[in-house]
Amino acid sequence: MKAYLDSSSFAKRLIDEAGSDKAEATCTAATALGLSVLCVPEIISALNRRRRERMLTPDEYASAKRRLLEDVRDADMINLTASVIGSSINILEASPVRALDALHIACALEWGADLFVSSDKRQLAAAKRAGLETKKV
């Protein structure tokens, strides 16, 4: 199964929170993992925010960053191509989602994902409307 995880879902593998067990199980069961090129900067941004807010120690941040960079080496990274941008426009016109959420859905479509994973209800509804099988984590 080709599983595409949006950034917040993939981040659940690094930070223990609600849905972390489901995200980990999905990655373990997947035969291929797809991520957008947006994933790494989005997760680094979130980790830095948690560090600034003292929700993560500097050592916890360094550990999470190291694991992220190791984990993405095994993933298929989907680029923001003209086709992806065009698809995201269609998604934005059809569904009330944010731009980055639409780009993640468009990346999953471009890659041919069997499963789209997110914790965002609107994003999941838009992904389903776009023809993707979905899973909430």
Image (tube, rainbow, N blue to C red):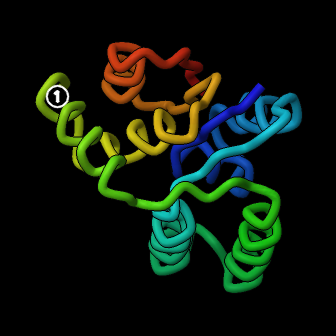
Q: Identify the residue at image location x=53%, y=51%.
A: 7
Q: Quadrant of residue 17?
A: top right
Residue 11, given in percent of the width and then of the height, sits at 62, 53
Residue 60, given in percent of the width and then of the height, sits at 74, 74
Q: Residue furthest left?
A: 93
* Location of the C terminus (image quadrant): top right
Q: Identify the residue at image location x=50%, y=31%.
A: 119
| Front position in the image: 72 or 53 | 72
| Left or right for 24, reference 97 | right
Q: Quadrant of residue 95?
A: top left
Say what amino acid the circle numbered 1 marks. Pro
**Vertical arrangement, residue 55 with respect to residue 124, above or below:** below
| Front position in the image: 23 or 40 | 40
Q: Circle 1 is placed at which residue position?
A: 96
Q: Residue furthest front?
A: 83
| Left or right for 103, reference 117 | left
Asked which secondary structure carries label 1, the reply is loop
Residue 105, given in percent of the width and then of the height, sits at 41, 36
Q: Identify the residue at image location x=27%, y=51%.
A: 85
**Vertical arrangement, residue 20 with respect to residue 94, above or below:** below
Q: Identify the residue at image location x=73%, y=49%.
A: 13
* Location of the N terminus (image quadrant): top right
